[in-house]
Amino acid sequence: MSGPDGLGAGEALDTLAELQVAHEELRVAEEEVRVQQEQIQQLLNRYEAERRWRGHLSAVVPVGLCITDGDGKVLDANPALAQQLHVPLSRLRGKPFSVFLSPADVRSYRSALRALGSGQAREHHSHVLVRGRGPDESPVSLFGFPELHGEPGGDTRIQWVLIPAGTPDGDADAGSRSVEAESLGLATALAELSSLPLAEGHRQELMGRMAVLVRSAVPAAGAVSISLGSPLAPQVLGSDSTAAQTFDGRQMQAGEGPCWNAYSSGEAVVTGDVDADPRWPVLARTAADGTVRSVLAIPLPEDGVPAGVLNVYSADRNAFDATGLRIAELVAAAVSGVLQTVAERESLRTLAANLEKALTSRAVIDQAKGVLMARLGVGADDAFARLVTLSNRLNVKLRDLAQLVVEGHADEVIAAGR
């Protein structure tokens, strides 16, 4: 019997089966393309997010920052450096950084440039005189280190931090030295934090390293912890000491504390005497015999919503003033940027794994088709159609069924399809 179009019933069924096979192959191909498109978009988003937060971080740092290549040419600089040199920001880029130094300091700067660029030195710290537009020279503390953002074998990038100093011969008073030390600690921590996203390792280890950097930047900090997720059940915890871990545990047990308030409110929380603060009576009782007295708790936002908290602890009462809070908020912004970049990297790895899995699945399906063609003496389309039909009948994913065939269970699969 023929249909209205002149095709017999068998031919119509064959045509329908071919269409089903073509449809299934198209679906698999579309899935692979979709995964690749997602991966490309994620790469673009990650690049833009990292560029955005690094640019913001550089802009808000209250000390001069610039990046040079291995020859000392300025690749990028922040507004604070432009203001310090009295030179428009646009005119800094592309200039040899040495032109902004006193001639007497150029030789030592070039030696530091070679040592940092070749890997012979991990950091450089010296006192130099800088000069911008005009004849005046200003004493600064110059700190440099090689960036770790480039791929192996890539172009050399060296970051420089310029901190206003009293005088290069060390005649600054104690207050000036304290301000310089705090500024240098902040700028160094921020620069180091910005180099962390490309570091390999477990996220908890990364957070522990960040905690150490935060402690070096925030004045009076004695211990630091970073928590991701709700304080009730944090997803990841990183700290620099057992003191931080102990106080984190006490907040969790008490169900209250600075960390809880910062996470729920999205605002910084400060206390100068945690065991006498009326906001947390339960915590006050358990903290009385501990070593932590002052606490700074800074929320770590993600898309405008707190995703975690940076906790800074001190054994001294009233240890954190307005300057300490401002510095803590700056480094918290850097920590948030690093964690966001790490999360995006993990997402990219997952996407890459899914893409690899999709490509592997296609290869396994092709191998299974070959096995069935040899066993049944049928063509490629018929072999694939049988796999699709059996996959639908048994409610088993096509790639899992194909894997069974490849692993030596072809006879069982053929029997199940009869």
Image (cartoon, grey):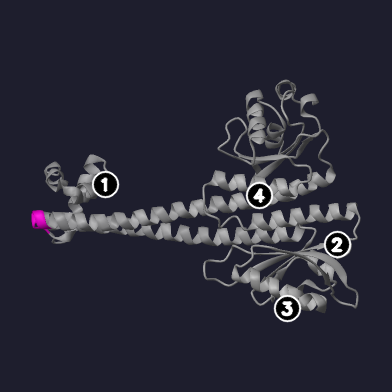
Circles 1 and 4: CB atoms closer than 8 Å: no
Q: In the rendered structure, which disc, 3 or 1, sits on the residue that comes first in sequence? A: 3
- Tell me the crowding category of disc 2: few under 14, some 14 to 19, or many 20 or more residues within 10 angstroms, Cα based: many
Classify residue 32 by image quadrant: bottom left
For the residues labelled 4 and 3, the Cα–Cα distance comes to 31 Å
Q: Residue at x 75, y 65 (%)?
A: 78
Q: In the rendered structure, which disc, 2 or 4, sits on the residue that comes first in sequence? A: 2
Identify the secondary structure beneath mark 2.
loop
For the residues labelled 2 and 4, the Cα–Cα distance comes to 28 Å
Circles 4 and 3: CB atoms closer than 8 Å: no
**Vertical placement of residue 86 versus 197, above or below:** below
Q: x, y (%) of residue 67?
A: 69, 68
Q: Nearer the viewer, residue 324 or 180?
A: 180
In the rendered structure, which amino acid carries the disc numbered 3? Pro
377 displayed left or right of 361 = left
Q: In the rendered structure, which disc, 3 or 2, sits on the residue that comes first in sequence? A: 3
Q: Is residue 241 at all visible to an observer of this figure?
A: yes
Give the number of the mark in front: 1 or 4: 4
Q: In the rendered structure, which disc, 1 or 4, sits on the residue that comes first in sequence? A: 4
Query: Looking at the rendered structure, which numbered label has been put on residue 165?
Result: 2
Q: Which residues are magenta?
A: 374-378
For the residues labelled 3 and 2, the Cα–Cα distance comes to 23 Å
Query: Looking at the rendered structure, which numbered label has been put on residue 335?
Result: 4
Give the number of the mark in front: 4 or 3: 3
Quarter of the image with the C terminus is: top left
In the rendered structure, which amino acid carries the disc numbered 1? Asp
**Vertical placement of residue 416 versus 155, above or below:** above
Query: Looking at the rendered structure, which numbered label has been put on residue 168?
Result: none
Determine which residue is flagged by label 3. 96
Determine which residue is flagged by label 1. 400
Q: x, y (%) of residue 179?
A: 85, 53
